[in-house]
Image (cartoon, rainbow, N blue to C red):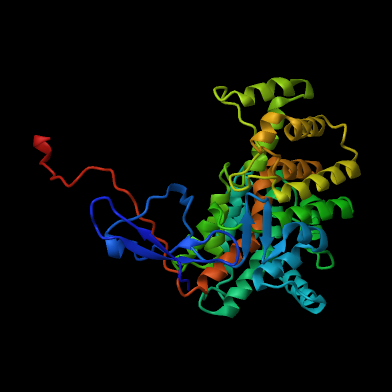
């Protein structure tokens, strides 16, 4: 609790009301307005929840002005360099980084759950071959509750843990199967001797007619993409997972809801939009004209992959992804590739042009992760599914935290009603 209060006064002479101010460990304090309606008969109005904290959380913290992102207090820069994705999963789920024994046990548990029920193959064959991977992913993840109904009691901590492991373990298998189905290639089963990300890449790219060779540089690059996308505080998809979970929905349904929200081009589709923008520019020689139009507010041209709603400084994830991007291009010998030359030229302008620097329109994580994924061989249509794979652990951690929060209630936003007042229905003949 706190001794600090905020006072709300009214110009119509109604008595002033005080509300407690609640402190966090870091970041902005919040005014606790829960008694507002009962005391005053008023709601607050906050479209997009720009100034509203809907929960308490100890998982992820963002300081947009500083360009800081913390998972359980650890800077993302340190985690991305010193940890692999499953260590970060353990951290997000359990609150602490694992020791060697804990990591080994966790990796074994995840590895032993990577296969999906064989009947899921029949489910995939019900989709058209040209289905978007996200359409398939929403369906198959939601259907998991029909195959694994021995872990659906959300009041049981063990059930929640089993569901969490299953989701983290099976998402790579499902995403890879979405890809294989659209390509018309045989489904590839996981191999327990491979690590999490190497296993995913093998399920994506191996074919029966030749052996798949694991490239450690590419595996590390994709693993870093997973780490950087694992959680990002109360964004749209995370809020969707929490809202669905507040009704008591099972975890598979909640994660499917998060995937559906992530599908939006303003959220998980941003890296796809950045690549499409580069394809639209076409050539380095056309960058000058594109930049000119992007600066013109009336042109309708948008610079995708630059700037961020939360970060008003250089996105810390983008710094890491930039290094990874150049490592991958070097490893694959793609610095002379048309699209990558175009991307690097656009990056240089954005980092040096006063127009972008003054507005803090730095390249964001979506800009670089799209380039890296394309270089690895992942098609643009699968980018958002890769994002969903990585974010699943964050969604689960947030969902589990919400279930355990005694203050959490079913989500029910209020509204400012602007429709017709009460009126009576007249008979059809007189209308």
Q: Is 334 on the left-hand or right-hand side of 130?
A: right
Q: Position of residue 339 (x, y in %)?
A: 78, 32
Residue 424 versus residue 4 in the image, above or below: above
Q: Position of residue 186 (x, y in %)?
A: 75, 52
Q: Nearer the viewer, residue 369 or 75?
A: 75
Q: Residue at x 75, y 35 (%)?
A: 351
Q: Residue at x 46, y 56 (%)?
A: 52
Q: Position of residue 374 (x, y in %)?
A: 77, 41
Q: Quadrant of residue 392?
A: bottom right
Q: Is 237 on the left-hand or right-hand side of 86?
A: left
Can residue 414 be seen? yes
Residue 122 versus residue 266 in the image, above or below: below
Q: Nearer the viewer, residue 362 or 165?
A: 362
Q: Position of residue 259 (x, y in %)?
A: 58, 54
Can residue 276 be seen? no
Q: Nearer the viewer, residue 114 or 267?
A: 267
Q: In what quadrant of the picture does the C terminus appear?
A: top left
């Amino acid at each position: 609790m706190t001794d600090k209060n905020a006072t709300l006064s009214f110009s119509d002479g109604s008595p002033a009301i005080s509300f407690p101010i609640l402190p966090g460990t870091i970041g902005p304090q919040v005014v606790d307005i829960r008694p507002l309606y009962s005391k005053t008969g008023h709601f607050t109005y906050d479209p997009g929840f720009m100034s509203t904290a809907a929960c308490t959380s100890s998982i992820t913290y963002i300081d947009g002005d500083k360009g800081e992102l913390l998972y359980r207090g650890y800077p993302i820069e340190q985690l991305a360099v010193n940890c692999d994705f499953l260590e970060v999963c353990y951290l997000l789920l359990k609150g602490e980084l694992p020791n060697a024994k804990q990591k080994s046990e966790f990796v074994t548990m995840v590895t032993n759950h990577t296969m999906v029920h064989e009947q899921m193959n029949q489910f995939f064959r019900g989709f058209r071959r040209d289905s978007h991977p996200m359409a398939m992913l929403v369906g198959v993840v939601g259907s998991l509750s029909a195959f694994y109904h021995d872990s659906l009691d959300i009041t049981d901590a063990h059930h929640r843990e089993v569901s969490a492991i299953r989701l983290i373990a099976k998402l790579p298998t499902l995403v890879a199967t979405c890809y294989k189905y659209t390509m018309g290639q045989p489904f590839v089963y996981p191999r327990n001797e491979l690590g999490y990300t190497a296993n995913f890449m093998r399920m994506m790219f191996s074919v029966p007619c030749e052996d798949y060779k694991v490239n450690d540089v590419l595996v590390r690059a994709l693993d870093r993409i997973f780490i950087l996308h694992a959680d990002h505080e109360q964004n749209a998809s995370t809020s969707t997972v929490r809202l669905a979970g507040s009704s008591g929905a099972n975890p598979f349904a909640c994660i499917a809801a998060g995937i559906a929200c992530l599908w939006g081009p303003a959220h998980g589709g941003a890296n796809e939009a950045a690549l499409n923008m580069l394809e639209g520019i076409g050539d380095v020689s056309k960058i000058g004209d594109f930049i000119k139009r992007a600066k013109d507010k009336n042109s309708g041209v948008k610079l995708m992959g630059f700037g961020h709603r939360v970060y008003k400084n250089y996105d810390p994830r983008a710094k890491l992804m930039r290094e990874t991007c150049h490592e991958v291009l070097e490893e694959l010998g793609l610095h002379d590739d048309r699209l990558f030359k175009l991307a690097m030229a656009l990056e240089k302008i954005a980092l040096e042009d006063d127009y972008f620097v003054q507005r803090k329109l730095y390249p964001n994580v979506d800009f670089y992760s799209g380039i890296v994924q394309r270089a690895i061989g992942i098609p643009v249509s699968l980018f958002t599914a890769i994002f969903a794979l990585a974010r699943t652990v964050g969604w689960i951690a947030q969902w589990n935290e919400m279930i355990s929060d005694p203050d959490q209630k079913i989500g029910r936003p209020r509204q400012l009603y602007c429709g017709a007042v009460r009126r009576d229905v007249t008979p059809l003949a007189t209308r």
